Image: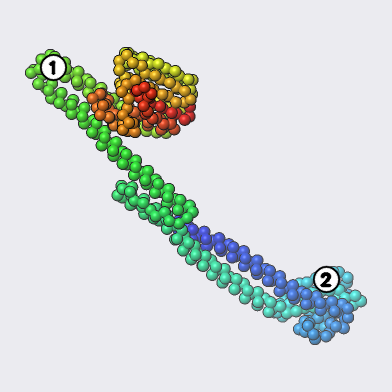
Amino acid sequence: MSLRLRLTIVAASVVAVVVAAASVTTYFVMRHELYSQVDNTISQHAGRIQQDPRFAFSGFGPFAGDYTALVGPKGQAAGAALPVDSRVRAVAGGADGFYRDTTIEGYSFREIVAPVPGVGAVVVARNIDYLHHDLSRLRLILILVSLGGVLVAALGGALVSRATLAPVRRLTAAAERITETGDPSERVPEGGRGELSRLGTAFNTMLGALEDAIETQRRFVADASHELRTPLTSMQTNIEVLKQQERLDAFDRERLFDDLQREAHEMRDLIGGLLELARGDDPRIAKTTFRFDELVERVLERAHSRFPDLTFDAQLEPTTLHGSSDRLERAVWNLLENAGKWSTPGSSVEVTLTDGELRVRDHGPGIAEEDREHVFDRFYRSAAARSLPGSGLGLAIVREVAEAHGGTVVAEEAPGGGAVLRLRLVNA
């Protein structure tokens, strides 16, 4: 069952319940009012007879058409031939009066039985066939009105649901077309107000994010393919040369093996960086609470071994973080490796951790102003870096890890020369 049909049924059902309740209420209110009018009239008639029993045999005035009978204490009756039963005789004997409906010779009557001092009781009856006829007509009218109201509600519900669900139909059609074509560049109109307009806006926002993600993925694959092609081509060339090793002396063969080993290391680092970037902000990555300053100390020990001709000066403030310690360790190592790569032998690298911000400052040539806003882009390598080993993914991984932890990373010119990279983690 479609949503439109369900809305129509719900609207018709609600209106049906409301109209039925209103019709039943109207019917019983009108019935009560009509009976009250009859009861007031015959009650006044009975009251006149209680004051003067002779009035029971006068059929003129506002009580014309009423049937009256006087009943003695022993049940003897005078006047109209109205039925006298035990209840009537009880009133004639001193019991309280009452109203009732009765049928006489196929006609419906409304009766009042009231005590008459010194006489017994009086019975006043009025034909109410007209009242039943009026109530029957009222029931028919209310039924027709109810059915008409339900029909109008169903038609109105269908029209309203059609208009209301138009944005949903557009969203559905757009989703189906995107599924068929695989192109998320389509957008749906965002007109109107309320939740459905917000739904359209949210849907377009989602499509925009999906389009950006697909475009990022395409660029990533294209860039990765380009970066992988260079070492693969070089390795293929060296392998082709090695096939002719009988023409090479021992020195050339050794040099080729060294090149192959270096290129294999570059491939390993490049593939590792690609895998790290592909992980992104995976929610399945385990996160723990740990001491970030102790993590930086461990990475500094590796940096000492990797760059023995450099001095690493560290000032680390105790800092507790909640996140992925493995990914943050990789980010810190990339910062220190970048600083070590650009530092001249014998210089120092200053590492400071305060207020949740890690600062790594080197005394190398620094980062050109035009390169600072690009050094964290994937595969970006400045003109000065192209002669050095590397894949251009190290600082991109740092930014990816920082953003995954709600932080930022920036590159600045250090006072006196060199560069300072600031990794800010907001949950520290």
SS for dot 2: loop
Q: Which label sits on residue 236?
A: none
Residue 109 visible here? yes
Q: Which label sits on residue 97?
A: 2
Query: Which color scheme does this rendered protein use?
Result: rainbow
Quick one: 316 or 217, which is closer to the camera?
316
Residue on which disc 1 sits: 252
Which is closer to the viewer, label 2 or label 1?
Answer: 1
Is residue 167 left or right of 109 when viewed as pictured?
left
Earlier residue among tags 2 and 1: 2
Is residue 106 left or right of 373 when viewed as pictured?
right
Q: Position of residue 67 (x, y in %)?
A: 78, 81
Q: Position of residue 16 (x, y in %)?
A: 56, 63
Q: Quadrant of the N terminus?
A: bottom left
Seen from this angle, which residue lies furthest right?
Answer: 118
Q: Amino acid at mark 1?
A: Asp
Is residue 236 left or right of 52 when viewed as pictured?
left
Quick one: 159 or 187, which is closer to the camera?
187
Q: Is residue 385 above or below residue 80?
A: above
Q: Quadrant of residue 394?
A: top left
Q: Quadrant of residue 218?
A: top left
Q: Position of residue 272 (x, y in %)?
A: 31, 27
Q: Is residue 384 above or below residue 57?
A: above
- Crowding around mark 2 (Cα neighbors within 10 Å: few <14, some 14 to 19, many 20+) is some
Seen from this angle, which residue lies furthest left?
Answer: 247
x 85%, y 79%: residue: 48
x 16%, y 19%: residue: 256
Q: Amino acid at mark 2?
A: Gly
In 3D space, how far apart are the residues under numbered discs 2 and 1 (Cα atoms)? 133 Å
Q: Position of residue 194 (x, y in %)?
A: 49, 54
